Amino acid sequence: MEIFIPKEVSFLIDTIYENGYEAFMVGGCVRDSILNLTPNDYDITTSATPQEIMNIFKDYKIIDTGIKHGTVSIILNNNIYEITTYRIEGEYENNRRPKNVEFTSNIEEDLKRRDFTINAMAYNEQFGIVDKFNGLEDLQKRIIKTVGNPDERFEEDGLRMIRAIRFSSKLGFSIDENTLKSIYKNAYIIKNISIERINDEFTKNLVSDNPQNIILLYKTKILENLGIHCNLNGYYYKELERDINILKSCDNNLLDRLIMLEYLISNKILKCIDQHEKYKYYCENIKKVNIINNLRYSNKVINYCNDIMEYM
């Protein structure tokens, strides 16, 4: 299998090889290239240490802010390319980050620490695809599956649970049964993740081609563990699962879809409330536990969405 490599990426990989080290493009850029999607960026992984990379590219502008975790960024033609040394991650703290990282010369050790099989592939023109965890097969099956034990992957970084749902929305894939069961089981871990990181993944999900998959954040109780509730009984919850597909018909922007999502939820709750009490009930019981006011959006987004919701 041949994959298109931009000339800057090819230059970086070839230059590293010329200096006696391995290098591959890795992760999402490989996945998207196989799917004929345009990658957002290109990450490179290598057997060279950060210091060796800085020596190789000493004549170029270098950003070394990620050097502690093995990452050096090279600027070529005003684009930033991250080059990260193959690494093994130590024990994770608070379901968020490893206490330490150890460099390795074995690319398989590096790939096995990644989140999902479809993100654990590497490629260069010398070797072709490096696929140790059946990522190609899972791309063909259109499923999101963790690398190895899903409980272990989610315990390492709880944000991966939302990322699984987000990739499902972005690619139109289903989530592997064991991976999904593990999300239900480990939803409480999300409490340890910063709201800023959650906001980023949630927003990407909402403006994806399949925003209706947001329902999984309610069904798995991930949002409930963040103090965000929909307070629906069984009947209205089934209605919401059906009606949430309307999000796909909204313009693909954050404000429209955020307002529509909150309206769908609020309106179902308010069906049981007397017409003259709806506004008061919304302000006192729904507004303070909704997404708009709990996922730390900008004041501009919060104020605009709250105004529209209250008018509605």
Image (cartoon, helix red, strand yellow):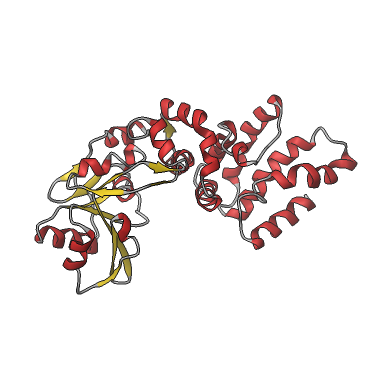
Which of these two is toward me, 68 or 140? 68
Residue located 75% across and 39% down the image: 267
Q: Is 263 placed left or right of 34 in the picture?
A: right
Residue 187: x %, y % from top left: 53, 34
Residue 13: x %, y % from top left: 18, 58
Corner quadrant of residue 109:
top left
Which of these two is toward me, 102 or 7? 102
Which of these two is toward me, 269 or 148? 148
Corner quadrant of residue 10:
bottom left
Quadrant in which the N terminus is drawn: top left
Q: Is residue 245 above or below residue 40?
A: above
Q: Is 121 placed left or right of 282 in the picture?
A: left
Residue located 20% across and 72% down the image: 58
Residue located 46% across and 29% down the image: 182
Residue 196: x %, y % from top left: 53, 53
Which of these two is toward me, 51 or 231? 51
Q: Is residue 118 above or below residue 84?
A: above
* Residue at the far right in the pictured view: 276
Q: Is residue 268 visible?
A: yes
Q: Report the number of numbered marks.
A: 0
Q: Is residue 71 above or below residue 77?
A: above
Residue 113: x %, y % from top left: 31, 41
Residue located 58% across and 33% down the image: 221
Q: Is residue 121 visible?
A: no
Q: Is 97 placed left or right of 48 in the picture?
A: right
